[in-house]
Image (cartoon, grey):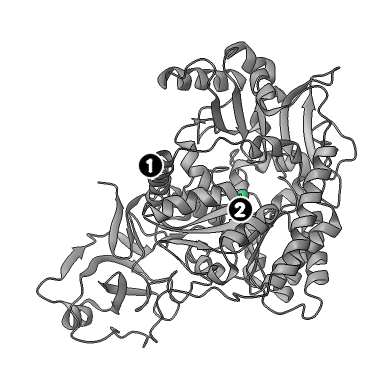
Amino acid sequence: MLATMGIAGRVLAALAALAFTLSSGCAKSPTAGAGIPVEPGAATGATSVAADAIYLGGDIVTINDAQPTVEALAVKDGKILAVGTRADVEKAHKGASTRIVNLAGKTLLPAFIDGHSHYFNSLLVANQCKLYAPPSGPAKDVDSIIAALRQFSADRKIPKGELIVGYGYDDTVMPGGRLLNRDDLDQAFPDNPVLINHVSMHGVVLNSLAMKKYGYSAKTETPPGGVIVRKPGTSEPYGLIMETAYLPVLNQAEPMTREQEIEWTRAGQMLYAEAGITTAHEGATHFAQLEAIKRATDAGANIIDVVAMPFITDLEKAVAAFPVSTWGTYDKRLKIGGVKITIDGSPQGRTALFTQPYLTGGPGGEKDWRGELTFPKDMVNQMVKTVYDMGVPLYLHANGDGAIDAFFKAHEFAAADDLTRDRDVTMIHAQFTRKDQIPLYAKYRIRPSYYTLHTYYFAEAHIKNRGRQQAMYISPMRDSIDAGLHPTNHTDFVVAPLDQMFMLWSAVNRVSRAGEAIGADQRVTPLEGLKAMTLWGAEQYGEEASKGSLEPGKLADLVVLDANPLKVSPQDIKGIKVLETIKEGRTIYSAK
Ligand SMILES: [Zn+2]
């Protein structure tokens, strides 16, 4: 209890301080590169300018409705110089030194724009044991988790006493409800602290040495908004420690060395580049992480654009270090893109807030459990108002329909002067949106960023926890697009792997692990699915003038795929491979 009062007190103090010190600045994010008006069908751009490169000989999917496909694309100085017929583009822009890139039947698209993930975690997972459930990883049960951890610690020769970390643990797929506990980890690793991150990234399972390291014991009370699973019949922490109860672990994360920051930045960004992504999202940036990202940025480590969202609890520090006037503009490929507020947990962790109880009770065995807001309602209202008053974009995590209601109430509180003005708000996940909530997104101009991968990864858990009807309607992309919204789609990496074609496949097919259709009426077309990871992603960051489609004047951020997602059969989309990723005309990843 005391711990949470501490958090709440700090947040309130910070918000109060901000209210005094902030003048509102930085409205819509400025963008690099201005779009040049395009004459549909014509090869556009200045004539007789020699291009650095001309791409031709394959499908070129522009994601521009005015000119959906072209035969050739010319690049100069990192920007798209022209698109059009091969004859026109070559005639106008083929010079003596122009490189002609023959796509040889492959497909060129705008590079992918990450709607939401946890970029900073990409720096860390290179040094953690992957514990995703099949098919994404080895962790099908407790024994296979322990086996993977043993192998990992042997391969890396981790000495006694050193922390062993795993990621991707999914309690919902453990057979027979036999969950990973402290004793399992103690038995295998009596001499090392072990920390296993839950797949939601909202909690951990610790062994006894790790409990000691982070300060958990039988005396630790469960804070409001938190979960500590206890050993049956005792008050000993035993399994998952979630949400606010897990903040002590977050707050004691060990800093990287300066060399590691740079080395791991490159390794982490290559994971994005391999996935065809040239704009990455850092979805909830704590201040120490922001400082590390900034140091690596200043050292020139960035190969892709990174948009970071300082977390609301660290806003005061973030604003002191990064004045609001600098937000929304890239500096050496880093941009502060808005503020992140999280108001509930995850549906698979049964910590998302719903208006109706979970069918399976709470994660700690609670009866009549609906989940909870992460922060008290009045504080949520105040937080949203603080961000609106700053005039910067808001990224708000809400999963359950109860949390989504709470956000709409907070919007009505914070935006009372003009409820329908575009305030650059993205709701992250918005998974259990009710049908009757869709018109409010449109009315209040809230962009949902959906998470259609749950139709595959977590559908069975959602059916069990929430019932079929609600589970079938998760991430209602079809209804949202039909209501005029431009939703984005995301992996929430490291919660799900960075696999943009698998994500697209999930939005288009909506099929569970068990092969069951999950809300077939919410399927989208492959083109809509692509927009949700390109053009609409650019809109989400206020960068549609420079990114998201292949139009003259925009950045030459490109991806080459081995097949055209608009032409293969929908169920084959997941097999499409990224062959090359190009950031501003320069190849940053090549499968060869
Ligand atoms: Zn997330």
Query: Which of the two residues, 381 or 578, is positioned nearer the viewer here?
Result: 381
Q: Position of residue 511 (x, y in %)?
A: 58, 47
The numbered disc on residue 42 is none
The answer to whether residue 115 is above or below residue 482 is above
Compared with 475, 129 (above or below) is: above
Image-quadrant location for residue 350:
top right
- Which residue appears at 77% of the width and 50% of the height? 10
Q: Which label is found at residue 263? A: 1
Q: Which residue shows up at 63% across the image and 68% down it?
A: 393
Residue at mark 2 to residue at mark 1: CA–CA distance:
30 Å
- Under circle 2, the secondary element is loop
Task: Pick whichever, 311 or 175, lies toward us.
Answer: 311
Q: Which residue is mark 2?
A: 451
- What element does badge 1 sit on? helix
Q: Is residue 323 left or right of residue 585?
A: right
Residue 357 x/y as whole percent: 86, 45
Mark 2 or mark 1, which is nearer to you? 1
Mark 2 crowd level (few <14, some 14–19, many ≥20, 10 Å Cα):
many
Q: Position of residue 107 (x, y in %)?
A: 32, 61
Residue type (three-letter) at the residue carrying disc 2: Tyr
User: Please, is residue 81 above or below residue 169 in the view?
Assistant: below
Residue 449, position as x, y percentages in the image: 61, 60
The reply to whether residue 438 is visible in this rendering is no
Q: Amino acid at mark 1?
A: Glu
Instruction: Looking at the image, tell me whether mark 2 or mark 1 is earlier in sequence order.
Output: 1
Q: Is residue 505 visible?
A: yes
Q: Residues within 10 Å of mark 1 (few under 14, many from 20)?
A: some
Residue at 42% from the left image edge and 50% from the top image edge? 296
